[in-house]
């Protein structure tokens, strides 16, 4: 046992050392009994490691303490161990007040997150309560703040701010000279104080003393921003007491160091801090935004808010609810800011949450329709939207109708509600659009759907998914067929989308086909697809054609041989057929793949993507860089023989479910025949051949 432990320790110290170097150390000491304490054998093993080790070229030179690192592997790179010197971290909160009453909930959220981080202590920088009031409301707000902070597992230390101190009495009533100072010290803590933690000292200063001449308290007047001789004398004594500490941190409410309306009284404080030589950081608040002002080796930080008034105009520039995390090491200080809401509790992510929450991202609403557009371009219709909760937990839902076309009117434009576990709910919306030509500014509406997955202790926001709604434009005046051929040009993410309600393909045999000319083929290349563990799709991955149909819970896939590939810059006719017994694939009128297949087609509520594949969210992916024309979806197996002559133009018939001849558009709407049209997206456009 001890010999193997010695080998393990030696390998940790020097992976390059061979077994021969260990032989003397591994031999039992003369006269020692098996199983006796290792004693000098272990020391000898370490010594042998040290003497025989040769540092490989490029390896870190760190010497590893064999008492702290164990492995049975030889020849591995030494891993430097972390320093064992005394270190800790603390958290600093910004202002709570000046915002709405519900801002205290943000404070409570910060407390919960801080408990997950587990700091040694928490500091505040003032404005704990709304204040500016008399005794009774002050006491109520004090209890509310202390109640929120009572959930904090780490000790916390307050700083007094103007909201905590300033007294406002009814008109004609006298205001106490000390205002709320006495109550603050009775219920929160001293106006100024210091304490030691490990190797560091924390100094709290008071920046809302009254004007020494007039007794006025006003942070907007420089003459009121003076520190009393009493507090300065205390600071001098405290800096003397803390002179041997490697780190001193100072906390106050007003960031007087920025000057301006604060005047220059802070200069005398700053000189004292610089002279001390060990003050590493000063933290303040009040301005409700982050600001960093290093000066003379001291880092000055103004914090934003934790529930206080926050416009949030530029969050990434420090206008947000957040708190600071400060790590103290013997030789350095590290500081990071965490937005409230950024810290997650990994214990909340149970197997159930991990498995079920993603299912909500794949929920597609069932929408009655499509939305009929009248001959004059107007819309006045009602739709029903049905949502089904696929999980065993309740979920909160929000539905919102939107469009980039301001001529739409939605009643209501949004709706909230709760879905019971596995429950279903149907909501009604009225959609109206003013009469007029379908122009370039016309856009079909979309339905944005969002969920919150609810557990007993947490709420998980599911990303909002946008679901375009289908339009039936068959009543609009026909677009004249052009004299020359046209096609849909796709570049980058360009594609066309046909809403689910516009392609009501019955179960059973069907045919999907198109003319395609690719500039290039991607490794995963969608052509005409409605596939997402369901339905059907034509693909041309790296130019290799395939056709998939989801039958009885699994895909049946016909694929062209490896050597048979589509050529770039060439028009090809592609077709997929399911005849009830077989899935067949045609390229330029010839069978290139077939597989036996039968069963019921697995349906979905996703749109049909022309020139790409579809994601579970309904968005397009794997889009084509090229051109596409004469897209046709038919009920029944159109092609039964192994070879046929593809038609360059199709004529709609009773089998036609969708025909997009790409011969004209009304605004962004491609006119279809015998079905609703498609909407051009992401720069797709019609081009004359």
Image (cartoon, rainbow, N blue to C red):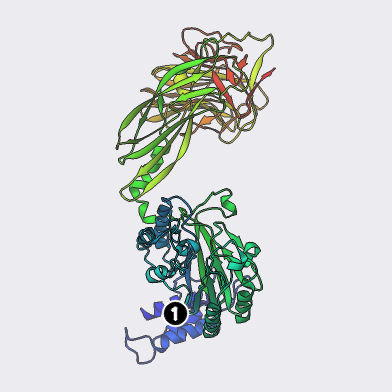
Above or below residue 184? Residue 22 is below
In which quadrant of the rendered image does the C terminus lie? top right
Is residue 49 toward the left or the right of residue 579 in the image? right
Residue 655 located left or right of residue 335: left
Q: Secondary structure at mark 1?
A: loop
Q: Can residue 593 be seen in this snapshot?
A: no
Q: Residue at x 36, y 39 (%)?
A: 396
Residue 471 is at least partly visible in this image: yes
Task: Residue lying at the far front in this picture: please name it.
Answer: 172
Residue at (49% x, 28% y) in the render? 446
Residue at the disc numbered 1:
67
What x and y, as percent, mark residue 202? 49, 75
Residue at 37% in and 47% down:
459
Frontmost residue, 503 versus 207: 207
Vertical placement of 236 versus 419: above or below?
below
Give the total number of marks visible in the rendering: 1
The quadrant in which the N terminus is found is bottom left
- In x, y percent, where is residue 424? 32, 30
Q: Where is 481 relative to 498, above or below?
A: above
* Residue 508 coordinates in the image, percent (x, y): 39, 17
Depth check: give the residue in front, 631 or 363.
363
Mark 1 neighbour density, 10 Å: few (under 14) some (14–19) many (20 or more)? few
The image quarter in which residue 43 lies: bottom left
Tell me where residue 245 appears, x and y as whole percent.
53, 82
**For residue 598, what is the image quadrant?**
top left
Of 484 and 446, nearer the camera is: 446
Outermost residue to the bottom? 31
Closest to the observer, 291 or 369: 291
């Amino acid at each position: 046992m001890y010999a193997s432990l010695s080998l393990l320790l030696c390998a940790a110290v020097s992976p390059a050392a061979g077994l021969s170097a260990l032989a003397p150390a591994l031999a039992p000491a003369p006269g020692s009994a098996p199983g006796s304490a290792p004693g000098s054998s272990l020391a000898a093993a370490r010594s042998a490691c040290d003497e025989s080790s040769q540092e490989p070229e490029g390896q870190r030179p760190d010497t590893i303490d064999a008492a702290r690192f164990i492995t049975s592997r030889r020849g591995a790179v030494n891993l430097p161990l972390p320093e064992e010197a005394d270190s800790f971290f603390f958290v600093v909160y910004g202002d709570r007040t000046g915002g709405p009453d519900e801002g205290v909930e943000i404070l409570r959220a910060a407390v919960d997150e801080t408990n997950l981080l587990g700091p040694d202590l928490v500091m505040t920088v003032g404005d704990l309560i709304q204040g500016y009031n008399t005794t009774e409301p002050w006491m109520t707000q004090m209890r509310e703040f202390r109640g929120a902070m009572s959930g904090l597992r780490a000790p916390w230390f307050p700083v007094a701010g103007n909201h905590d101190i300033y007294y406002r009495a009814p008109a004609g009533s006298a205001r106490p000279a000390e205002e709320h100072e006495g109550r603050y010290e009775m219920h929160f803590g001293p106006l100024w104080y210091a304490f030691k933690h490990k190797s560091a000292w924390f100094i709290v200063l008071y920046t809302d003393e009254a004007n020494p001449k007039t007794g006025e308290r006003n942070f907007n007047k420089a003459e009121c921003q003076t520190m009393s001789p009493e507090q300065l004398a205390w600071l001098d004594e405290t800096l003397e007491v803390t002179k041997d500490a490697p780190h001193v941190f100072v906390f106050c409410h007003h960031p007087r160091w920025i000057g301006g309306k604060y005047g220059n009284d802070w200069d005398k404080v700053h000189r004292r801090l610089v002279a001390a030589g060990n003050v590493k950081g000063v933290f303040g608040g009040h301005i409700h935004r982050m600001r960093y002002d290093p000066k003379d080796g001291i880092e000055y930080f103004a914090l934003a808010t934790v529930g206080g008034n926050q416009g949030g105009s530029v969050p990434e520039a420090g206008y947000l609810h957040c708190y600071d995390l400060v790590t103290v090491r013997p030789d350095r200080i590290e500081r990071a800011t965490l937005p409230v809401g950024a810290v997650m509790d990994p214990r909340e992510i149970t197997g159930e949450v991990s498995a079920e929450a993603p299912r909500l991202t794949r929920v597609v609403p069932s929408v009655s329709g499509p939305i009929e557009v009248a001959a004059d371009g107007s819309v006045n219709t009602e739709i029903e939207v049905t949502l089904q909760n696929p999980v065993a937990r309740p979920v909160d839902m929000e539905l919102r109708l939107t469009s980039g076309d301001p001529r739409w009117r939605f009643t209501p434009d949004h709706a909230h509600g709760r879905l019971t576990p596995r429950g279903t709910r149907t909501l009604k919306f009225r959609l109206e659009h003013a009469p007029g030509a379908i122009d370039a500014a016309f856009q079909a509406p979309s339905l944005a759907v969002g969920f919150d997955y609810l557990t007993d202790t947490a709420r998980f926001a599911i990303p909002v998914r946008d679901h375009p709604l289908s339009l039936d434009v068959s009543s609009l005046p026909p677009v004249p067929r052009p004299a020359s051929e046209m096609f849909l040009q796709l570049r980058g993410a360009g594609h066309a989308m046909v809403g689910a309600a516009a392609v009501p393909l019955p179960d059973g045999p069907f045919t999907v086909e198109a003319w395609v000319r690719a500039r290039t083929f991607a490794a995963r290349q969608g052509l005409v697809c409605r596939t997402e563990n369901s339905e059907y799709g034509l693909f041309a991955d790296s130019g290799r054609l395939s056709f998939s149909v989801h039958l009885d819970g699994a895909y049946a896939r016909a694929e062209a041989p490896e050597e048979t590939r589509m050529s770039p810059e060439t028009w090809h006719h592609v077709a997929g057929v399911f005849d009830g017994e077989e899935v067949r694939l045609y390229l330029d009128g010839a069978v290139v793949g077939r597989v036996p297949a039968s069963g019921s087609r697995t349906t979905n509520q996703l749109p049909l993507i022309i020139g790409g594949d579809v994601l579970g969210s309904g968005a397009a992916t794997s889009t084509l860089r090229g051109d596409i024309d004469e897209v046709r979806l038919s009920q029944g197996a159109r092609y039964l023989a192994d070879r046929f002559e593809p038609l360059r133009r199709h004529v709609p018939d009773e089998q036609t479910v969708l025909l997009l001849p790409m011969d004209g558009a009304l605004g962004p709407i491609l006119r279809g025949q015998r079905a609703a049209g498609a909407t051009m997206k992401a720069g797709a456009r019609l081009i004359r051949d």
